[in-house]
Amino acid sequence: FQGHFSWEKYLKETGASAAPASCFRQSLTPPVNEFKAGMKLEAQDPRNTTSTCIATVVGLTGSRLRLRLDGSDNKNDFWRLVDSSEIQPIGNCEKSGGMLQPPLGFRLNASSWPLFLLKTLNGAEMAPPRIFHKQEPPAPEQNSFQVGMKLEAVDRKNPHFICPATVGALRGVEVQVTFDGWRGAFDYYCRYDSRDIFPVGWCARTGDNLQPPGTKAVMPKTSGPLTDGAVETSAVHTTPAVSKGGGQRGRKPGRRKVKGSWSQKA
Ligand code: MLZ
């Protein structure tokens, strides 16, 4: 349930305007989601992006899939749009000369991977190639966001959530996504053509669920106690969440309550 959040009312109340759809790298008609729970496909390992792995659809939310890598645990699920270029039908990797890899954090001994792979694919329901989307929508030519515009954005610390947000700042090709009502605790910078940001109304049209804004009053933008990283300087990475791999071993995306090394920090 989303507590009947209405963008129409909210935009009126805040006197803000929605970022036009042309700012986003999203298709104008949201991509149809014909996947089903249990289907298997190939996906880039979010923690080790040079690896292509087998993933199982463990949930569906609007135009997104909740994915779990076969041989991994249930603490590292990730979400992808059905038109993401990071998911492919099974067979694609081999066709292009690659080899399927065990996920980072493979539960078993590395030597048991070949047999595991055989078993996991045996009798599996493979997502049929026709339900994949030919390509991702093209990126808009330039960053045309403006500070103050409203949008919907994936909360990268809780990636199952899409939440109302505001463009807080612009920095070349980057946009600062600030989450309404959360005092900066979940904010991040991303490229203007990130697949994690959507025009107002996206969730309503795709059937994904939009979280209502937080209830924390907006504070003047300095580091308050909530957002202050003070002591843990050693925990600060410059790697954007989910996209780069290797160093994130054992990390649990979406499980962290407080600010972590995840955030954006470029
Ligand atoms: N209830 C959790 C998730 C907050 C999600 C915020 N999204 C912008 C918390 O309070 O940490």
Image (cartoon, grey):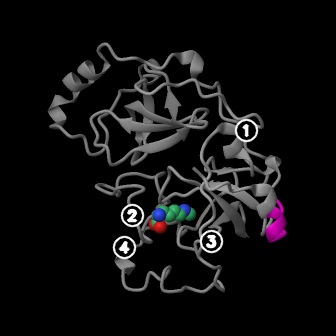
Taking the spot 63% from the left edge, 64% from the top edge, the residue there is 213
Disc 2 + disc 1, Cβ < 8 Å: no
Disc 3 + disc 4, Cβ < 8 Å: no
Q: Is residue 61 magenta?
A: no
Q: Identify residue type, mark 2.
A: Arg
Taking the spot 29% from the left edge, 40% from the top edge, the residue there is 72
Mark with earlier residue (1, 4): 1
Q: CA distance from mark 1 to mark 4?
A: 35 Å
Which residue does the numbered mark 3 point to in the structure image?
A: 181
Q: Identify residue type, mark 4.
A: Ala
Please state which of residues 236 and 3 is positioned toward the viewer in this rendering: 3
**Residue 235, which numbered label?**
4
Residue 25, image quadrant: top right
Mark with earlier residue (2, 3): 3
Residue 17, image quadrant: bottom right
Which residue does the numbered mark 1 point to in the structure image?
A: 138
Dot 4 crowding, Cα within 10 Å, few <14, some 14–19, many 20+: few
Residue 256, placed above or below residue 225: above
Asked whether mark 3 and ligand 1 are closer than 8 Å, the reply comes as yes
Q: CA distance from mark 2 to mark 1?
A: 33 Å
Mark with earlier residue (2, 1): 1
Mark with earlier residue (2, 4): 4
Q: CA distance from mark 2 to mark 4?
A: 13 Å
